[in-house]
Amino acid sequence: MSETRNLREALDAGGAFEVWRLLDEEEQRRAAVAVWENADRGTRQPLEMALAAQLKFRPKMVRHLAAEKVAGRLLRLIKDLPETVAFQFLFHLHMAERRALMGEFLDAVGLPHEDGVLDLPEDAGAPDAEKVAEAAGALLEAHGREALVYLATLWVADADFWAGLEGVLERYDESGEPLAA
């Protein structure tokens, strides 16, 4: 019998796809809608091409479909997309719905931001690991699974910068459940 991986190990192995598995079906649908409505052309283009092939439409026609109409199809496609595109689903979910949570965490860490979006100088170093861990613990206590998804997304985006999250993420199993102490 194999031992269960902790969340940090799962994220290191599976990246954005492991974070995706933490979302429930409704969150995944909202992420698909958010990416379709808000992504830039470079992110949307592979999605449009994949949908066009699936629907047997010209890509130009797919571009104009409503997000609610394509969300289900996007969800079925995600496993076949590159991890960078899967990450965009997570990114756009947070940008569309979770800016207050993002801002709360960044404020607690003491990092400058504009409505939850980091505003760092080019040469900025990583934040203090203890401060990150403390802020992450408080965020998890206040927001539960939504906070865990956000913190896991930060880890996948830049584990070196967010090194203070390592111990926090190791306290959860790969499905996001707390491990026994």
Image (tube, grey):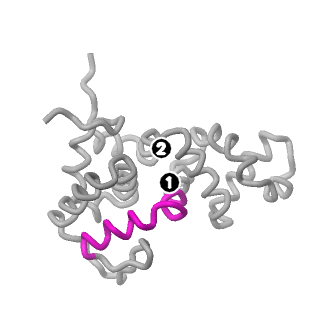
Of residue 37 and residue 138, the one placed in the foreground of this image is 138
Q: Secondary structure at mark 1?
A: helix
Q: Secondary structure at mark 2?
A: helix
Question: Which SS does the magenta portion mostly show?
Answer: helix
Neighbor class of circle 1 (other Cα within 10 Å; few <14, some 14-19, many 20+) is many
Q: Is residue 151 left or right of residue 56?
A: left
- Point out which mark residue 164 bears: none
On the image, which quarter does residue 5 sit in? top left
Residue indicated by mark 1: 90
Q: Is residue 152 above or below residue 55?
A: below
Residue 59: where, in percent of width, then height? 82, 54
Residue 100 is one of the magenta-drawn residues: yes
Q: Is residue 56 left or right of residue 10?
A: right
Residue 92: where, in percent of width, then height? 54, 60
Residue 178 is one of the magenta-drawn residues: no
On the image, which quarter does residue 109 sit in? bottom left
Amino acid type at image mark 1: Leu
Residue 36: where, in percent of width, then height? 67, 57
Residue positioned 25% across, 70% down in the render? 108
Residue 100: where, in percent of width, then height? 42, 67
- Point out which mark residue 20 bears: 2
Amino acid type at image mark 2: Trp
Neighbor class of circle 2 (other Cα within 10 Å; few <14, some 14-19, many 20+) is many
Q: Is residue 34 left or right of residue 180?
A: right
Q: Is residue 30 above or below residue 119?
A: above
